[in-house]
Structures are given as structure tokens and as C-alpha cells.
Image (cartoon, rainbow, N blue to C red):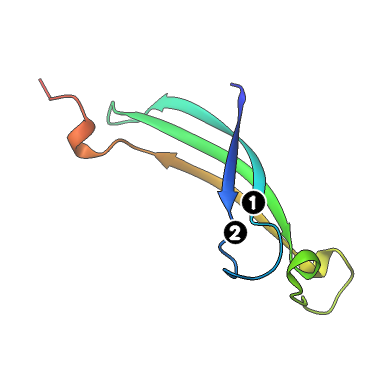
């Protein structure tokens, strides 16, 4: 399955100086759930540094571990009930 590129806006501290967009690479996998309905499974991972560019000091410890937030995403999207095909 090819990777998808998704842009996102910063929501850590709105109005804070620093980049407002981050590139996040992930995979989107179509699947059929146990209930027979379609789903999209999303896998992604990304990091955000806090000291530079946001000026937020992290806890004690070595750089870059002390000021780096790591995000690992793995979730499923499902259609809204009104978008499902009629049963029968």
C-alpha cells in the first residue's frame, strides 16, 4: 500500500512562534471489518521538537530526548451511519 502525505496545523500552543505545519507520513489501508462494513486503517508516526522552535524547556535529561514528543498513531476510520448502504 503506498504511503500518503498529510499536512497538519500546529495546535500545541496557538500563536506561539515556530513552524505551523508538519509533514506526517503514514499508510492508509482499506479493510472489511468483522461486521462486514468498510474501514480505513491509518498508521503514522512523527516527532515534534519543543525547545527549538517553540522555546519550551523539557525535563532534565539528554538532548534531544528531553524536548522531543513522539506520536505513534494507529486507528480505524468508519463511515457515518447515513453513508452506509441499506441492509438487505
Which disc is residue 30 wearing?
none
Instruction: Residue under label 1, please give it.
Output: 21
Q: Position of residue 11 (x, y in %)?
A: 56, 63
Position of residue 42 in the picture relative to residue 22 (left or right) = left
Query: Which quadrant, please, contains the N terminus?
Result: top right
Q: Position of residue 65 (x, y in %)?
A: 82, 64
Q: Position of residue 37 (x, y in %)?
A: 29, 28
Residue sitting at 45 percent across and 25 percent down? 30
Q: Residues within 10 Å of mark 1 (few under 14, many from 20)?
A: few
Residue 63 versus residue 32 in the image, above or below: below
Sequence-first tag of 1 and 2: 2
Q: CA distance from mark 1 to mark 2?
A: 6 Å
Residue 31 or 53: which is nearer the viewer?
53
Residue sitting at 77 percent across and 77 percent down? 57
Position of residue 70 in the picture relative to residue 87 (left or right) = right
Q: Residues within 10 Å of mark 2 (few under 14, many from 20)?
A: some
Q: Are marks 1 and 2 in contact (CB under 8 Å)?
A: yes
Residue 31 or 56: which is nearer the viewer?
56
Instruction: Residue under label 2, please give it.
Output: 10
Residue 23 or 73: which is nearer the viewer?
23
Q: Using the rendered view, name the quadrant where residue 68 is placed.
A: bottom right
Amino acid at each position: 500500500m503506498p504511503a500518503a502525505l498529510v499536512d497538519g496545523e500546529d495546535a500545541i500552543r496557538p500563536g506561539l512562534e515556530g513552524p505551523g505545519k508538519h509533514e506526517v507520513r503514514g499508510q492508509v489501508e482499506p479493510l472489511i471489518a468483522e461486521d462486514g462494513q468498510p474501514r480505513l486503517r491509518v498508521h503514522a508516526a512523527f516527532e515534534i521538537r519543543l525547545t527549538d522552535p517553540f522555546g519550551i524547556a523539557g525535563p532534565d535529561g539528554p538532548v534531544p530526548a528531553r524536548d522531543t514528543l513522539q506520536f505513534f498513531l494507529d486507528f480505524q476510520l468508519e463511515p457515518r451511519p447515513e453513508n452506509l448502504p441499506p441492509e438487505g
